[in-house]
Image (spheres, rainbow, N blue to C red):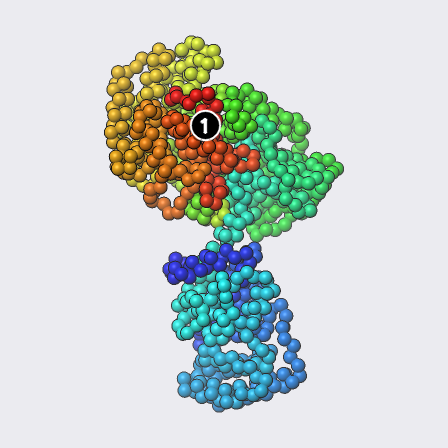
Amino acid sequence: MSAQDLPIELRRALAAVARMPRLLVASDYDGTLAPIVADPAKAYPHRESVSALRALAGLTATTAAVISGRALRDLAALSRLPVEVQLIGSHGSEFDVGFVHAIDNDAKQLLREVQNSLTRISQDNPGASVEIKPASVALHVRNAAPEVGRRALQQARQGPASWVGVQVTEGKAVIELAVIQTDKGAALDIIRHQEGASAAVFFGDDVTDEKAFARLAGPDVGIKVGEGDSQADYRVDSTEEVSKALAFLLEERRTWLAGASAPRIERLTMLASPRAKSLVTPDGTITWFCHPEPDSAAVFAHLLGGTQAGHFTVAPERPGLPLSQRYVDGTMTVETRWASLQVVDYLPHDVPPERTDLTRVITGDAKAVVTFAPRPEFGQVPVTLVREPAGLRVHGTNDPIVLRSPGVQWTIIEDGIHHLATAVVDPSRGPVVLEMRCGTSDLAPAMVSEPDRRTEAERYWRTWSDQLELPPLKPDLMKRSALTLRGLVHAPSGSIMAAATTSLPEDIGGVRNWDYRYCWLRDASLTAHALVTVGSLTEAEEFLAWVHRVLDTLAGPERLHPLYTLYGETLGPEAVLDQLPGYAGSRPVRVGNAANMQVQLDVFGPIVDLLSALATAREHKGITDPAKALPDRDWELVTAMVSAVQRRWREPDHGIWEIRGNPRHHVYSKVMGWLTVDRAVRLAERFGRHVDPAWLELRDTIAEEVKAKGWNDDVQSYTAAYDGADLDAATLHIGLSGLIDPSDPRFAATVVATEAELRSGSTVYRYHHDDGLPGGEGGFHLCAAWLVEAYLLIGKRSDAEALFAQLVDVAGPTGLLSEEYDPVAERSLGNHPQAYSHLGLIRCAQLLSEPVPALVQ
């Protein structure tokens, strides 16, 4: 049985109570955590229940307790519950933090008399037994014959149970006589008050548990085990189902707590070197860092698993929120500042190819606490830290890692199977420099001083950004978007990442969590195209060289996969990392991407469109020789892409959105096939290349088919695919590409339908049809950018300006955009930062900066 087999009403109640600020989870023992057995001394708890209670007790703002009728000493010995779980014995009269009630001499004398009386009754009734506790005596008749048991209980009721000063509690086959007040409900209230719990969950099976159920109110949840009348609102059938309910509550609670503490995606800031990428939180934690490549395993995966997954944190010794975080203008260096304290983070450039370095420089007048907790290979290998005069060595991984930190006094702490190191540093005596070096065991000083290394790194970015031709609209944001796109370039290979992260969710708590740390032909082409439009051609040239190298490994261009590793290799199988709970509890965490094996026939268009933009840009830069503006190698790539379209354009595919279902005849893919041929024809005519007459015929054939089969009269729009009535924002490209004239009434109708069906406030969804995956997703920033362009093409400039302003407003404080946006929760979703989003932002600013509505290029 899984937790999903529990009653739906119970699951809903547990999911709701799991979101209380402070939660108390309490349970009876016999018949609840442990099954009822003939020998009470062998009533051992279910291992799963013990594990769940222990884990619950270990969560923030969560208390776990067991309230039992057993004597506290017996409960502790038998249950084997860990110390994290509070134990209350004798129906609430014994607490593991101290005996609540003092027993005076009169009570002690009465207790002896009760004990003597019940002992005589047990001797007269075979199978009955007496259990002596500090403030009570219990008569058990479970092992007596039914008639004998009934007689013994009646004798107890008529005898000591009727005495003055004796409190009676009856349960299943037991009567307990106490000389002080005992009440599970009172015990529940005591512990609730001690812990300041906002809500309580209580599991019980016996009539003695009804006093606890009676105390529950409001958001509290009472769960009765087994049959019988009860004041509890919910019921399960067995102790095994108690285990399942506890496990479900644990997962819901853990997910909610993780979500409450996870840094908002839009507030994460990317560090970048020509090869390495990293993310830092607004409060100075390195939350994401991979080695040896950005698509390798993480050394710090705090972003997907909290502190246990590895982090590198700098914070003021006197706790306080940061005052600001910003990029140094024109660079990828990040400054985080608190009152009297600052940390500067950057990824040095002057490192050998096998190394990935991270430098943190702490300055100011206040002391800082540094925590260094590397977890290589996503934390799957035990880590040992060793102190040396110059810093720390990380042992446990085949690839050496060191942290050069001369003068820092580290304390090494065991953290499960790992070590972490902490130190208090005083930057008032001079800057504290922390240099993490992955891929080397060298702790010696660098050949170049830290200030010079920082200057070199910043010069790389600033020299590049200063020569850009940026649109005048929102110039600072445009510069940051361009830098972000270049930051996603993997310079050693020439490839370009779609985003810097894996598994940031498209729906908090959902399963739409994908790995975007690879090179998609489409995404990379569009990124390189955007950089060409702002005056930087190098990225496009190096990416196209990468494409040529990939093509050299294939039988033909039609065999291209949608994506590859950063070095152009085929991805391995998509895998799930079960040990990571995911961002805000969003599981699974994935590495690899199964879209690698999909059929995506739109990829040829963006490549040829990039080649067209590059050739035109070369002309504008003064290269008038057509053979140099469009060299043979580039023209060969154009013809290869057209050849691929000729062979495959009639096939169905999975489309731009990589839907994990059956292939369809997606309109966007057909439009991109048309665009491939159209741009090839235009290039040939402009640069004196031969045009195959078959290309002209193919261009017309594709266009006519798309116009005929892509339109749906019922919905008055071009649709996602030939065989459906569902809309897709990507279909706007039927006009954006020039396949139909923007003045065509059908394009205007498609824009109106897209707005009505897919736009929500400041964002635009990709589609709303069932794609075979559970859960939802946010709106796509790129789709919003497409709608801005579409508005301009049909003369709705004020709508375009308003949507662009909303798109700008959702950028994070350091100017970064993730993939998606939730307009209801007003938070970003998806991997971050996302190339699609930033190239869309640049395109919008360029179009809106033109004095007249943009025409199709």
Residue 52 in the image: state x and y as whole percent: 49, 60
Q: Is residue 321 above or below residue 148?
A: above
- Left or right, 107 with respect to 37, comes to right
Residue 628 in the image: state x and y as whole percent: 43, 12
Q: Nearer the viewer, residue 416 or 712?
A: 712
Q: Which residue is mark 1?
A: 844
Q: Residues within 10 Å of mark 1 (few under 14, many from 20)?
A: many
Residue 186 in the image: state x and y as whole percent: 56, 72
Q: Residue at position x 42%, y 40% from top? A: 760
Q: Residue at position x 60%, y 24% from top? A: 459
Considering the numbered disc 1 on the image, is that residue within a helix, a strand or a loop? helix
- Left or right, 332 with respect to 757, comes to right
Q: Quadrant of residue 430?
A: top right
Residue 525 in the image: state x and y as whole percent: 42, 26
Q: Nearer the viewer, residue 557 or 620?
A: 620
Name the quarter where the N terminus is drawn.
bottom left
Q: Residue at position x 30%, y 34% from top? A: 717
Which kind of residue does numbered mark 1 sit on? Cys
Q: Quadrant of residue 634?
A: top left
Residue 554: in sight, yes or no? no
